[in-house]
Image: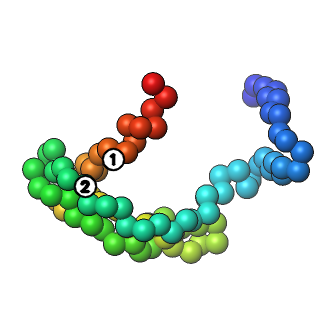
Amino acid sequence: MKTITITISVPDGVNVSVGQGQAASKPFVAREAPPAPDDYCPVHDVAWKLVPAGVSKTKFDDNGNPKPYNAFWACPERGCNEKPGRPGDADLLPF
Ligand SMILES: [Zn+2]
């Protein structure tokens, strides 16, 4: 096994934990349903469908509770992984 050393600078007062807790899930933040996208699934040429917020049937948090998720838009076709583009994201690009 290789050993590497990583130095991380952390401001005073910030707790850093390394180890088993590292993979801990981020705390869930409930959000309003996103606005309706004005494009279509590029594969199926159908309008996106709003999936209401709920809890996951397949993902669980560290305590074994189903993970909650926020409402999102998705293709109504089963198994389709296409997602609407978010026009606002372009503004976040650093160039
Ligand atoms: Zn689709």
Q: Position of residue 55 (x, y in %)?
A: 44, 73
Q: Nearer the viewer, residue 86 or 67?
A: 86
The residue positioned 36% from the left and 61% from the top of the image is 34
Residue 17 is left or right of residue 28, and the answer is right
* Mark seen at residue 44: none
Kind of residue at disc 1: Arg
Quadrant of residue 78 in the image? bottom left
Taking 13 as reference, is 66 left or right?
A: left
* Image point (83%, 39%), residue name: 10
- Whether label 1 touches label 2, CB < 8 Å: yes
Q: Mark 1 Cα within 10 Å, few/some/many (few <14, many 20+)?
A: few
Location of mark 1 (residue)? 86
- Dot 1 falls on a residue whose secondary structure is loop
Query: Does 88 appear above or below 75?
Result: above
| Circle on res. 37 | 2
Answer whether residue 64 is visible to the viewer in this image: yes
Seen from the viewer's position, the closer of residues 78 and 40 is 40
Helix, strand or loop at mark 2 = loop
Looking at the image, residue 67 sits to the left or right of residue 13; the answer is left
Residue 92, position as x, y percentages in the image: 46, 38
